[in-house]
Amino acid sequence: MFLLAGALHAAPPELRWGGDAEGGTPFVEADPQDLSKVRGFDVEVAEGIARGLGRTARFVQCAFASIDQSVARGDFDLGMSGVEETPVRRAALAVTIPYFEFREVLTVREKDRERFHSLSDLRGRRVGTLGGTIAYEMLLAARGTDDVLPVSYDDDVHPYEDLAQGRLDAVLLDHILAARSVRRVPGLLVQPKGLATGHYVIVLARGNEALRDRVDSILRGMMADGSLERIYRKWRIWDDEQASFVAGQYSGGATRPPGPPLAQPDASTSSTPPAAQTSRATLAVRYVPALLRAALITIALSCLSMALAVLCGVAIASGRVYGAALPRALLTGYVELMRGTPVLLQLFVLYYGLSAFVRLPAFVAALLGLGLNYAAYESEIYRGALEAVPRGQLEAARTLGLTERQVFTLVRGPQAFRLALAPMTNDFVALLKDSSLVSVITVVELTKQTSIMAANVGSWAIPGALCAALYLLLSLPLSRLARRLEARWRTSAG
């Protein structure tokens, strides 16, 4: 009876949705009042969908460029956070109806407001945008027709900073990102005329069309009852074009009775609700605990990966020194493969490429990717150290009757370890920094958390300084320990 009552009162199932908090306001950002939570118009749309499904929404952090692969892999049910509708995306995934319409606009320096109004005005000029977007495809097409020089970025912060500093002549992105950026970076202006229109959609894994159809129905309901409009008004991204788009989506062009005056987003209007405004200094202080938690993930990942690299490296080096011809050839091939391909590619293969056979948790995939990659480098260090021990000492040990195992553990191994210590320390520091790459497979480590902080604070100065200080705090003690051990061994050897 009690079990039945517990089942009746069990919490509703979760609806996991993936997005990138580095995208910042108004899409997804950490709540300044509680950094363990996220807020934004995509957050509220996801919560509305979850309510319609009788579930509770749970946010899953995912690098923007990996949302498609992660939803296809099954890391979450819905992928959103400013995901654009494209023919390729519709062919590869189950895609919902559009729920937001955006305009591609040009941002220029204020002094160039009369010079650059369209891509044809930017002949021979450098124009920045986000890679993998509709805007980037437009620039690639314009490269052939108008001789525009496209410059691709991985985030929407640096293009506008480079524009202000004169490294670019314009930036082409959607009007939401443009309006936010000109508030953050002084001296910029958004040209009012849109060059193209696009839509945000929600993506699901292929084969999940039943859930996609239910989400479509809920989105149409949110459009019809005005709840979607209320969300957009709250985040100040509602305008006349959006009103026409929403009305057309749910009623085939009919319009609802007019509501309050439409808010026109511009450079002087914040997309964040006024009650939620927080100073940069206050935000930076509130992010410190999140950075410390991310630093713990970084050090745990780095230590475990280095331990795996050392164990595998010793085995590989021993096999190449003592093994027969075939094992030596196989181990040499492994070393060359791991050293000759990027660690980022190896992470993608482990996490996404093998997902059809085995679905590794993100942290485990990161641990294996870094550990197996660095094992190849460690093995070369150990092999060189083993072969650097004078052969005369080895022959003398054998003459005294020591077995090969005793020669290795008592004579060759200890001396090789002393020779390998300094390079091992350098490799650990390098691995500590390379751990920043694992954010592409949804692990939020120190550098990714810093990027999220910088996007939401609106500056890289304080976040960058804090991140650098934490990396130094993590790496310097190990370097000092290694130097002390080297000094002690030199003294004992003397």
Image (tube, rainbow, N blue to C red):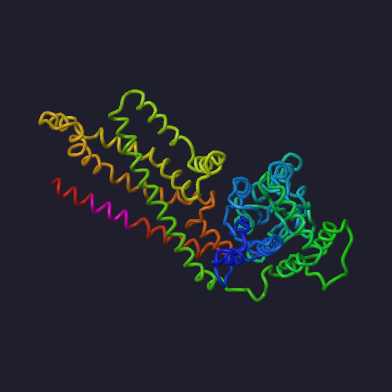
Check the image and name the residue furthest to the bottom.
275
Q: Is residue 190 visible?
A: yes
Please give left or right for residue 369 compared with residue 69 in the image: left
Q: Is residue 345 rendered magenta in the image?
A: no
Q: Is residue 180 above or below residue 203?
A: below
Q: Is residue 480 rendered magenta in the image?
A: yes
Residue 476 location (% of width, % of height): 34, 57
Residue 20 location (% of width, % of height): 60, 56
Depth order, front residue of 482/331: 331
Please give left or right for residue 140 compared with residue 435 in the image: right
Check the image and name the residue furthest to the top.
325
Check the image and name the residue furthest to the front.
1
Residue 270 location (% of width, % of height): 69, 69
Please give left or right for residue 124 compared with residue 37 in the image: right
Q: Is residue 14 above or below residue 272?
A: above
The stretch in magenta equals 477-485
Residue drawn at point x = 75 percent, y = 43 percent = 146
Q: Is residue 374 above or below residue 328?
A: below
- Picture quadrant where residue 175 is located: bottom right
Residue drawn at point x = 44 percent, y = 47 percent = 367
Depth order, front residue of 125/435: 435
Residue drawn at point x = 45 percent, y = 33 percent = 337
Residue drawn at point x = 23 percent, y = 39 percent = 413
**Which quarter of the image is occupied by the N terminus?**
bottom right
